[in-house]
Image (cartoon, helix red, strand yellow):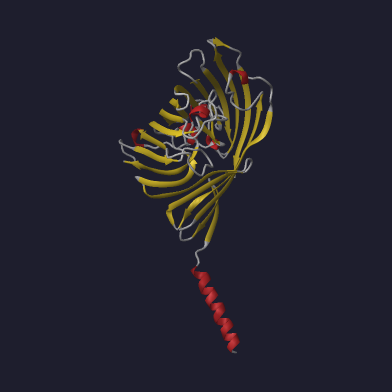
């Protein structure tokens, strides 16, 4: 009998313990599958994303005149295969996120955010540096097939470090977002700095009329009120590198592999963007100065892009509602001290949204015009089709 009573007591205790545990709710959201405890202290999002691409005669943006196009390299590939995990733990304001590139076995993002106060938030880990809009916008939420030719020379890409950010006077006429970052300045995956010099980045964004614009391309929300921004940003860094990408630190054309602290980089940005009734606009002006401490010489780069898109169904009801037409013009000058070295990109794209950016098909024609020695040389035309799907 004693044994029976003991077993009964054990079962009773187990039931009481199980009652104390919060239930887990499962649902499918616009961030994938969400697992949420009933007390709302824990939330976990899991999302997968695939990007299939066909391109001819080549896929990558040409870097030099010789690459426009030296040979036919028609491709069909899985361009991106991502696993995304995020949510919050213990409190809704203690958030986390990590992202993994399956096709290249790269850990892209891993970060923790303390977002208790809207005007003062903290981020630590590795992420895409909040410098320019074109790079921060996810490749799955872009308007064109890919980013412009300015990304290679001007992006700061993913860095490790700490960032303070927030929004001041939200929904008022003096509505600002700010981002202040202190980073290693060695690129994705770098675990230590080359010297004592860190990367410092600052971005200040004015939200017109007190309305914030999300980091996404295309006016899928069909903003009935004009929503726009004007932003300025600046960055400084000293490292062995003159450029950054998803692969980490690297060199721009014409620069040799650097030693510790060889290149001092100063760069600045002016940016505008808006959305209104199916019309979207964004553009950036870039300036970058590279000082080589070994060669004792300075190289200055500058460039800009202008991009717009429109859902013509807004004014022409017979036009397909899920169809958007967009275009972009970009110019880039690799060295302002030299003449006749301007690089241009003209692009037009058509998007068909099956389910917003989570399931879309994009086709794009791009025309490149590179100059060399003050002469217009033969140009390159590229065609690409891309299907991007998240689930």
**Residue placed at 55% from the left, 53% from the top?**
27
Picture coordinates of residue 323, whole percent (x, y): 56, 30
Q: Say whether residue 76 is visible.
A: yes
Q: Say whether residue 310 is visible.
A: no
Q: Which of 318 and 226 is in front in this view?
A: 226
Number of numbered discs visible in the structure rendering:
0
Q: Examine the image and state in which quarter residue 302 appears.
A: top left
**Residue placed at 50% from the left, 59% from the top?**
37
Picture coordinates of residue 208, whole percent (x, y): 35, 33
* Relative to 277, residue 331 above or below: above
* Relative to 99, residue 264 above or below: above
**Residue placed at 58% from the left, 45% from the top?**
100
Of all residues, the one furthest to the bottom in this rendering is 1
Quarter of the N terminus within the rendering = bottom right
Q: Nearer the viewer, residue 132 or 320?
A: 132
Picture coordinates of residue 261, whole percent (x, y): 46, 34
Q: In this view, does 355 lie to the left or right of 131?
A: right
Quarter of the C terminus within the rendering = top right
Picture coordinates of residue 311, whole percent (x, y): 51, 29
* Relative to 366, residue 191 above or below: below
* Relative to 90, residue 83 above or below: above
Of all residues, the one furthest to the top in this rendering is 375
Q: Nearer the viewer, residue 1 or 77?
A: 77
Q: Is residue 163 left or right of residue 8?
A: left
């Amino acid at each position: 009998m004693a044994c029976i009573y003991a077993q009964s007591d054990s079962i009773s205790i187990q039931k009481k313990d199980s009652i104390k545990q919060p239930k887990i709710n499962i649902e499918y959201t616009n961030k994938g599958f969400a697992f949420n405890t009933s007390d709302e202290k824990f939330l976990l999002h899991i999302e997968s994303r695939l990007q299939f691409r066909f391109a001819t005669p080549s896929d990558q943006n040409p870097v030099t005149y010789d690459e426009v196009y030296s040979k036919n390299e028609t491709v069909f590939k899985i361009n991106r295969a991502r696993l995304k995990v995020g949510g919050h733990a213990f409190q809704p304001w203690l958030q986390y996120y990590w992202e993994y590139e399956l096709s290249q076995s790269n850990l892209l993002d891993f970060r923790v955010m303390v977002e208790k106060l809207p005007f003062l938030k903290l981020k630590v880990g590795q992420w895409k540096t909040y410098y320019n809009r074109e790079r921060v916008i996810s490749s799955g939420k872009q308007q064109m097939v890919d980013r412009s030719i300015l990304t290679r020379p001007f992006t700061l890409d993913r860095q490790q470090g700490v960032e303070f950010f927030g929004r001041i006077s939200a929904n008022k006429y003096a509505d600002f977002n700010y981002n202040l970052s202190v980073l290693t300045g060695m690129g994705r995956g770098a675990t230590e700095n080359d010297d004592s010099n860190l990367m410092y980045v600052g971005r200040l964004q004015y939200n017109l009329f007190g309305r914030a614009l999300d980091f996404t391309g295309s006016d899928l929300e069909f903003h009935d009120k004009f929503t726009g921004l004007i932003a300025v940003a600046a960055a400084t860094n000293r490292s062995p590198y003159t450029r950054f990408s998803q692969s980490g630190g690297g060199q721009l054309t014409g620069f040799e592999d650097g030693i510790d602290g060889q290149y001092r980089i100063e760069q600045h940005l002016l940016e505008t963007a808006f959305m209104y009734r199916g019309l979207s606009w964004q553009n950036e002006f870039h300036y970058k100065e590279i000082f080589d401490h070994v060669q004792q010489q300075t190289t200055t780069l500058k460039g800009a892009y202008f991009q717009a898109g429109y859902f013509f169904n807004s004014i022409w009801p017979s036009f397909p509602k899920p169809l958007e037409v967009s275009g972009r013009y970009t110019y880039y000058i690799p060295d302002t001290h030299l003449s006749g070295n301007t690089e241009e990109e003209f692009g037009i794209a058509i998007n068909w949204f099956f389910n917003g950016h989570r399931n879309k098909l994009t086709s794009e024609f791009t025309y490149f015009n590179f100059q060399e020695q003050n002469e217009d040389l033969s140009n390159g035309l590229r065609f690409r089709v891309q299907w991007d799907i998240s689930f």
